[in-house]
Amino acid sequence: MLETTLSRSPDAKTADPRDRAAAHRLAAAALRHLGTLSAVLEPFLRKEPPEPVRAALLLGAAQLLFLETPPHAAVGTTVDLMRRRGLTPFAGLSNAVMRKVAAGGAGLLEGLDQDRLNIPPWLWSSWKTLGPGVARAIARALSHEAALDLTLRPGVAAPEGGEVLPTGSIRLPAGTRVTELPGFMEGDFWVQDAAATLPARLLAVKSGEHVADLCAAPGGKTAQLAITGARVTALERDPNRLERLKQNMERLRLDVTTVCTDAATWQPDAPLDAVLLDAPCSATGTARRHPDALWIKRPRDLAALNEAQDSLLVAAARMLKPGGRLVYAVCSLQQEEGPDRVRAAEKYGLKSDPIRPNELADLPEALTPEGWLRTHPGMWPDRGGMDGFFAARFVKAS
């Protein structure tokens, strides 16, 4: 949502790429620290200002407290924004509030439980069920910009300055411009969070097998499957997202059959050897990269997502040959979208195929007692964290 909103800005097409990147960085910082910034501003506001004014104040405070913008620049741009957006009556208020924030500086953050403030209460309560201290560990991971992870083609050397992660991904510093890296146009690698590589890996696809990747865009997992030599059919119902997937496969020089369709209604010509279902979800596990994900979802949204997830599970089971393999995955931290969905899988003719410890020897903390995969942003705190994923594996009953 953040990327889409910024791309629709009147200045988006003509802005310098560096200015677009700076705008994204500022908006993302305000979202990462939204609760903290709101708490800082509250004492300086006698009543709640109009939403556009509040948004400008949040952006200004984010510059001062988290982006190390010089005070005169942060105050000046905030006041100027008021005037350019037709909010001149609030220019004086903005000037006064920003000067108070600049004067208070980091001292305004003392005594604030920033971890709790920056996570919506319903999500904090939900994440506490993941284990002792996990909610706070996730919150701390979400307060920082995510690094750039790459998946390499076999035999390709890692870009200079990259850290080889235990799972084999290459991690580069946040802000790295992937299109400027040597080997990008040659298709030597693709962008994919380290945690996002695991579901496809657990499917253990072999060369020559016919595999479907449901809800496939933007194509990172599709590429993982195709590079094994498998015959891959990638399904995506959004034409724009499918076009992006096609472009990615073309750059990577991978032969993939693409179909623009709703995976819940599609049926292959012949039963499949394996299916990867990365189901649509709340995406709360990706908030390191998409901090708006925390604030645009509500508990009531889960019911519709659960219905879609169940429909896709039923469809995926129907696509498989007897003995065929299925990995169900979501980039969500919510119990309702992971464990609660797969516990009913036997009704769809699926038998649990628990993940074995040796399959996650490079990330043993991600293996649950049930034999499922569960990652969260608080893992690898010294390396910068990872996205949150849930995955479970099944075999179709004979």
Image (cartoon, helix red, strand yellow):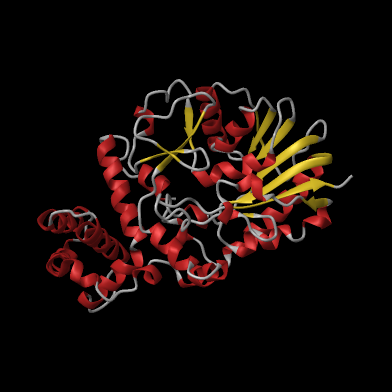
In the rendered image, the vertical position of residue 176 relative to residue 23, given as above or below: above
**Residue occupying the far left of the picture:** 72
Q: Is residue 307 visible?
A: yes
Question: From the image, which quarter does the C terminus lie in?
Answer: top right
The residue sitting at 61% across, 27% down in the picture is: 227
Percent coordinates x, y for residue 278 in the rendering: 63, 46
Residue at coordinates 47% horizontally, 56% vertically from top-left?
Answer: 377
**What's the residue at 39%, 45% (across, down)?**
147
Residue 160, located in which quarter of the rendered image?
top left
Instruction: From the viewer's side, name the closer residue of 94 and 220.
Output: 220
- Counting from the top left corner in percent of width and height, residue 54 is at 28, 65
Spot occupied by residue 198 in the image (x, y as percentages of width and height)? 59, 44
Left or right of 227 in this view: 307: right
227 relative position to 40: left or right? right
Marks counted in the figure total: 0
In this rendering, is residue 126 above or below 234? below
Q: Nearer the viewer, residue 186 or 15?
A: 186
The residue that appears at 48% across and 69% down in the rendered structure is: 133
How far across and how far down the image is residue 164, in percent?
Answer: 44, 38
Of residues 200 and 244, the one drawn nearer to the viewer in this rendering: 200
| 242 vs 264: above or below | above
Q: Is residue 13 above or below residue 398?
A: above
Q: Is residue 262 visible?
A: no
